[in-house]
Image: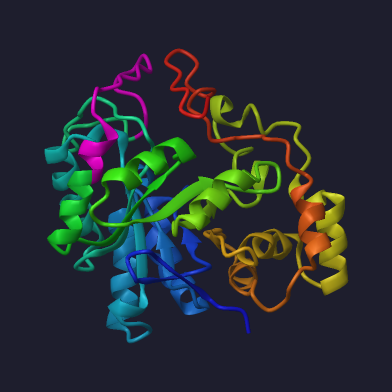
């Protein structure tokens, strides 16, 4: 039986398959999470930017109260948004986020992007994403990554977070953090699908004991429903579900194309965090460890790589591009 967890550099075990909370409406988040727990999910991937942490936490608390799980069986990942990179803001925001979840601590706390934006008081902010006003202004701030990382390390010291890591970073920054990290860089979360395989980044992370989590495992599928600025790159791109090597493998093993894409990642020890509101697909997405692709099948799917990145603030913030992937 394939291993269902991945060991972080902190020594903690993280499930290899989790449930992603991006785009889950706050109005339905509690029920969605509760149902996902009933289906077998134990890892939930959230972020301040998703604006549903409190409601997701309520779903978990209900499941604990009803005896479905214990707190120790649940693994919560959440992320620090860009406006809170200064030391005092990072610590304050992490405490605020942990309180919102209501679970006592955060299992894995990530820096969401390698770019600091000017501070906005979370009590008064109107725009939870990149913008600070009606005209769509994006305002960078001069905060070194080291300051934010060391603030996150203090969260581990204080028991607010068990493990820490980063999201949307590239190799140069990972090498840099490792030169001064006092607590290990446990995880890297990246956009990862056959159209954006990023093999060298994955290899570098794994060689250095950094666990990799893939988001948007289905490629353009995650972005076509978004507003025009965010969906433009995904429009007209063939769905990965329809790609010939994916369909061939799905037919051979009698599984859905979605399960093939998730197994393509998990078989290479990359965690995945798909989401679905459909009960059948919820169960299917979780059951992706029961079959193995051949080396040739993995290579055929990887050969679909186009270097096609959909989550790129250098592209979808045209007036204030942040070219972090340049």
Q: Residue furthest front?
A: 179
- 118, 284: nearer the viewer: 118
Q: Residue at x 81, y 65 (%)?
A: 250
- Please give left or right for residue 257 compared with residue 181 in the image: right
Q: Is residue 170 visible?
A: no
- 300, 207: nearer the viewer: 207
- Please give left or right for residue 56 compared with residue 40 in the image: left
Q: Is residue 20 above or below residue 133?
A: below
Residue 194, x across and y down, in percent: 70, 48
Q: Residue at x 37, y 64 (%)?
A: 9
Image quadrant containing the N terminus? bottom right
Extent of the magenta region:
129-149
Residue 144, x across and y down, in percent: 25, 30
Q: Magenta includes 143?
A: yes
Majority SS type along the magenta span: loop
Q: How many marks?
A: 0
Render colour scheme:
rainbow
Q: Residue 258, located in which quarter of the rendered image?
A: bottom right
Q: Magenta includes 243?
A: no
Residue 14, x across and y down, in percent: 42, 69
Q: Is residue 103 visible?
A: yes
Residue 61, x across and y down, in percent: 28, 72
């Amino acid at each position: 039986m394939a291993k269902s967890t991945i060991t972080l550099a902190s020594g903690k075990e993280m499930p290899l398959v989790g449930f992603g909370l991006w785009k889950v409406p706050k109005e339905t988040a509690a029920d969605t999470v509760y149902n996902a727990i009933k289906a077998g999910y134990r890892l939930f991937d959230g972020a301040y930017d998703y604006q549903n942490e409190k409601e997701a936490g309520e779903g978990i608390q209900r499941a604990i109260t009803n005896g479905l799980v214990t707190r120790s069986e649940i693994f919560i990942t959440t992320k620090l948004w860009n406006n809170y990179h200064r030391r005092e803001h990072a610590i304050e925001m992490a405490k605020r986020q942990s309180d919102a979840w209501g679970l006592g601590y955060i299992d894995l706390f990530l820096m969401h992007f390698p770019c600091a934006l000017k501070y906005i008081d979370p009590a008064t902010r109107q725009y939870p994403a990149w913008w600070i006003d009606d005209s769509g202004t994006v305002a960078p701030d001069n905060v070194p990554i080291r300051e934010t990382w060391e603030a996150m390390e203090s969260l581990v010291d204080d028991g607010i977070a068990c493990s820490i890591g980063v999201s949307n970073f590239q190799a140069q920054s990972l090498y840099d953090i490792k030169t001064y990290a006092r607590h290990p860089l446990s995880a890297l979360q990246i956009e990862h699908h056959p159209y954006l395989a990023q093999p060298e980044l994955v290899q570098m992370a794994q060689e250095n004991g950094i666990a990799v989590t893939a988001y948007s495992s289905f490629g353009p599928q995650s972005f076509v429903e978004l507003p025009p600025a965010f969906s433009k790159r995904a429009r007209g791109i063939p769905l990965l579900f329809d790609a010939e090597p994916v369909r061939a493998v799905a037919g051979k093993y009698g599984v859905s194309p979605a399960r093939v894409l998730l197994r393509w990642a998990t078989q290479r020890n990359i965690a995945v965090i798909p989401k679905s509101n459909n009960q059948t697909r919820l169960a299917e997405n979780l059951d992706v460890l029961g079959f193995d692709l051949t080396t040739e099948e993995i290579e055929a799917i990887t050969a679909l790589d186009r270097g096609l990145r959909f989550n790129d603030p250098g592209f979808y913030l045209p007036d204030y591009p942040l070219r972090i992937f340049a």
